[in-house]
């Protein structure tokens, strides 16, 4: 049995430490705004190489709040890759902006060429999604945005600890957002998220938006919302952050085994990695025309897999009105062939070899 995710096993490996951190919060009864929040924000900012971190309620809110804080022209266009989770585009619409979908590149991140072609005088920002744990091509995206005077938002929901040319993601553009959804590389025990940036003014603005536009208790400068990171989640995340490097190494080792054992199979495309990227493998995604059959074969052998994502964003009912679906795009045909193999801190090298062997058997039988 190889699970796709094993949060119960992860908890067992650090139960005493976690129970004590959670008990501290409950005993103090500082459920909102407790000291664990600042402590985690500071630790996570340092971890990502950012000056500032603002904890928020989830990764979708993080994107929405970041977009609001950037104060982009109402109704202006924001470029979003077609293969991502809906939050990447949903936040754009919710912030009163216009989604413009573009194709992905062969590394599954936003195609810089497609983004360049999609630029218009109304473009105000690009969302660089560091999909599956690999950074988008920041060498080209950052100069492109600077040249055009538009913003870069990094959606790093899947990329805690990922690097581009040795620098951690999140603060490479103007502002970056993270999700701590339980299944992410760094996950809370519920919903949680964060925003990072090098700019103090943007961080202040985000903090106010996420907390009713308040400067002080009952002193509200504008209408914001309630999207605070709560103390219990901050305590959980603080404990988990100290294990993240070790868990990322595990993911990278599993990916290394898959790369080595699955090479050379016809009709199986392995994930490619940009030489400048430190990939943290939130997901290890392959492509095959026989996706359904392979998934069933693996499932019969007790190996769990996933599909990210089964419907490309422009094809969703939610976006039909945009008419952005283009059958020639890579991302718009991938949804029938993508398959996410199991990967995570719960897997041993032997597990990765066993999964590889079953996949080889499928393709040779
Ligand atoms: C998970 C995810 C989000 C949203 O995060 P939530 O915490 O679930 O709101 C945004 N973007 C991407 C790419 C994600 O994978």
Image (cartoon, rainbow, N blue to C red):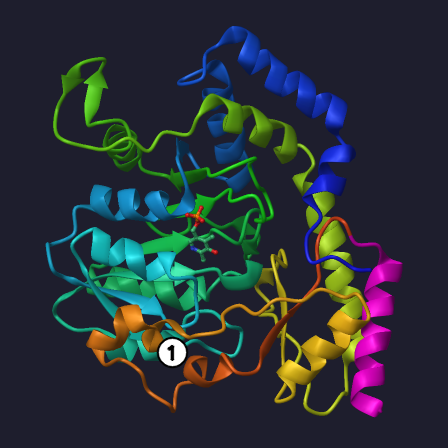
Q: Which residue lies furthest to the front in this view?
A: 300
Question: Pointer 1: residues within 10 angstroms few (<14), some, or many (20+)?
Answer: many
Residue at x 48%, y 34% (from the top left corner): 45
Looking at the rendered image, the quarter that the N terminus falls into is bottom right
- Viewed as shown, does residue 109 lie left or right of 134? left
Percent of width and height locating residue 133: 56, 58
Q: Position of residue 32 (x, y in %)?
A: 40, 18
Label 1 sits on a secondary structure element that is loop
From which residue to which does the magenta span run? 347-365
- For the point 63% across and 19% down, which residue is it? 21
Magenta stretch mostly in which secondary structure? helix
Q: In which quarter of the image is the C terminus?
A: bottom right
Indicate yes or no whether the magenta region holds residue 364: yes
* x and y percentages locating residue 134 in the rendered image: 55, 62
- Residue at image point 37% right, 65% down: 141
- 91 inside magenta stretch: no
Residue found at the far top of this picture: 28
Picture quadrant where residue 86 is located: bottom left
User: Is residue 309 visible to the viewer in this orientation of the structure?
Assistant: yes
Residue tagged 1: 103
- Of 189 and 299, which appears nearest the observer? 299
x 69%, y 36%: residue:
243
Vertical comparison of 284 with 22: above or below = below
Residue 142 in view, yes or no: no
Q: From what the image shows, is residue 41 above or below residue 67?
A: above
Does the numbered disc 1 mark a residue whose Cβ is under 8 Å from ligand 1?
A: no
Left or right: 58 as drawn, with respect to 302: left
Classify residue 123 by image quadrant: bottom left
In the picture shown, does residue 138 fall above or below 230?
A: below
The foreground one among 294 and 129 is: 294
Q: In this view, does 28 lie above or below 85?
A: above
* Residue 227, x across and y down, in percent: 33, 33
């Amino acid at each position: 049995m190889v699970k796709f995710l094993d949060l119960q096993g992860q908890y067992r490996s650090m139960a005493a430490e976690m129970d004590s951190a959670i008990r501290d919060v409950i005993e103090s009864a500082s459920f909102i705004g407790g000291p664990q929040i600042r402590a985690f924000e500071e630790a996570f900012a340092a971890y990502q190489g950012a000056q500032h971190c603002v904890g928020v309620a989830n990764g979708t809110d993080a994107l929405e709040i970041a977009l609001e804080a950037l104060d982009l022209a109402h109704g202006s266009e924001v470029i979003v890759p077609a293969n991502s989770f809906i939050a990447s585009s949903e936040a754009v619409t919710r912030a009163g902006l216009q989604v413009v979908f573009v194709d992905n590149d062969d590394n599954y991140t936003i195609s810089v060429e497609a983004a360049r072609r999609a630029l218009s005088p109304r473009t105000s920002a690009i969302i660089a999604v560091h999909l599956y744990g690999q950074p988008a091509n920041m060498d080209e995206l950052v100069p492109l945005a600077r040249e055009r005077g538009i913003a870069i938002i990094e959606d790093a929901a899947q990329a805690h600890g990922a690097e581009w040319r040795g620098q951690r993601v999140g603060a490479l553009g103007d502002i970056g957002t993270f999700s701590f959804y339980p299944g992410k590389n760094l996950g809370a025990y519920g919903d949680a998220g964060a925003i990072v940036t090098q700019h103090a003014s943007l961080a202040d603005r985000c903090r106010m938006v996420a907390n009713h536009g308040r400067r002080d208790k009952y002193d509200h400068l504008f209408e914001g919302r309630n999207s605070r990171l709560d103390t219990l989640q901050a305590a959980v995340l603080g404990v988990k952050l100290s294990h993240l490097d070790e868990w990322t190494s595990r993911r990278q080792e599993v990916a290394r085994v898959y790369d080595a054992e699955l090479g050379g199979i016809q009709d199986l495309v392995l994930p490619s990695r940009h030489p400048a990227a430190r990939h943290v493998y939130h997901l290890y995604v392959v492509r095959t025309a026989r996706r359904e059959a392979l998934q069933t074969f693996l499932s019969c052998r007790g190996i769990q897999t996933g599909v990210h994502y089964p419907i490309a964003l422009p094809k969703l009912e939610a976006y039909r009105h945009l008419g952005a679906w283009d059958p020639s795009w890579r991302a718009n045909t991938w949804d029938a062939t993508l398959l996410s193999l199991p990967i995570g801190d719960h897997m041993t090298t032997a597990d990765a070899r066993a999964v590889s062997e079953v996949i080889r058997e499928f393709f040779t039988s």
